Image (spheres, rainbow, N blue to C red):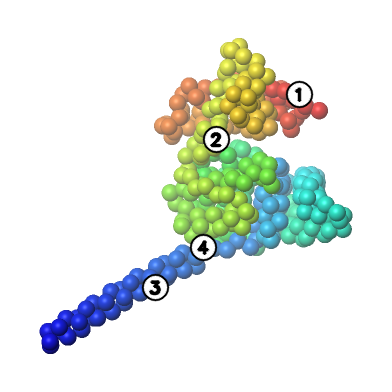
Amino acid sequence: MQRQVTNSTLNVYKLASTSATAARRLDATRRHFSGSSSRMQAVNNMTVFGGGLMGAGIAQVASQHGIKVTLCDLTDQALATSKTMMQKSLSRIANKKHPDSKDEQQAYISSVFDNVTLTTDPALAVKDADLVIEAIVENIKVKKELFRMLDEECSAKTIFASNTSSLSISEIASATSQARRAKFGGVHFFNPVPQMKLVEVIRTEETSDETFQSLLDVCKRMQKHAVSCKDTPGFIVNRLLVPYMFESVRMLERGDATAEDIDAAMKLGAGYPMGPFELIDFVGLDTAQHILDGWRQKVESGQADSLSSDLVAPSALLSQKVKEGKLGRKSGEGFYKYN
């Protein structure tokens, strides 16, 4: 009888020990996730450099979701154009939200613009920035010059991110101090930003977990779907999409088919919403040229083993159109003419 009592007692001790172990593990798990959250830096003030389609779109969406945004560009005229673009986009959104009330539409637009500051002063723009997003010309030298200057102006806490569509985040970050590189990543939004849900969040080998989580969080606050990717040429979308566009141009150069027929074939046969030439005109022929040139430089320098030399070969047709200023929709003519 005594033995049975002892066994029962031991079983109770084992159960208690198991429960305690489980409790400790649960507590450790809670501490782990709580620590992850505390290590994530909140973004309440965002600065966007570049007031073009992408920069204005990023600024608009962030401000719509309660983030204070400073939009910086070179001239007051550029900023006025940015504000006009945002005004038109917000007017469409306000009309859908409040179709029966002009007053409510205007109140909504005003509430968004309350979160936006426009400036041509870079130092003033980043004074209180938690996050700086660069959305300027797709030229790595220009981007590096900007971030080199900002590294000296910004607080040590400020996160840096580039909206580049294809350039190396690591190479851009190399213009900054070693400490800053841990707070450097990529956030590739898609055009038009207010409509497109996807953002590619890119981390380099030096990007800290805190920075990466902060970038994911700000995308979530902007109600975007973030996908993560390593710092590889073209990331995810453009690594698949750009070769498709360039092969279409080469088909046209060879005389295999017309631009109209190639576009029709891909829309009606593959179910794409736009044909490749419509897409290049939308993206901008100069942007496509920058991507092609950048990839070719990487291949020639041995920095991109995953890209073939045939893929990045120059396109005489694309180069000629860029030289002629036929850049697509934004210039009124690319592979097609626009009013």
Query: Residue 261 falls in which quadrant of the image?
Result: top right
Q: Position of residue 75 (x, y in %)?
A: 77, 46
Question: Circle 2 is placed at which residue position?
Answer: 238
Is label 4 in contact with label 2 (beta carbons under 8 Å)?
no
Amino acid carrying label 2: it is Asn
Is label 2 in contact with label 3 (beta carbons under 8 Å)?
no
Of labels 1 and 4, earlier in sequence is: 4
Residue drawn at (78%, 50%) of the image? 96
Residue drawn at (50%, 55%) of the image? 212
* Disc 2, SS: helix
* Disc 4, SS: loop
Q: Is residue 245 left or right of residue 69?
A: left
Find residue 27 and name its label: 3
Q: Position of residue 233 (x, y in %)?
A: 49, 36
Q: CA distance from mark 3 to mark 4?
A: 20 Å
Of labels 4 and 2, earlier in sequence is: 4
Is label 1 in contact with label 4 (beta carbons under 8 Å)?
no
Q: Residues within 10 Å of mark 4 (few under 14, many from 20)?
A: some
Of labels 2 and 1, earlier in sequence is: 2
Q: Residues within 10 Å of mark 3 (few under 14, many from 20)?
A: few
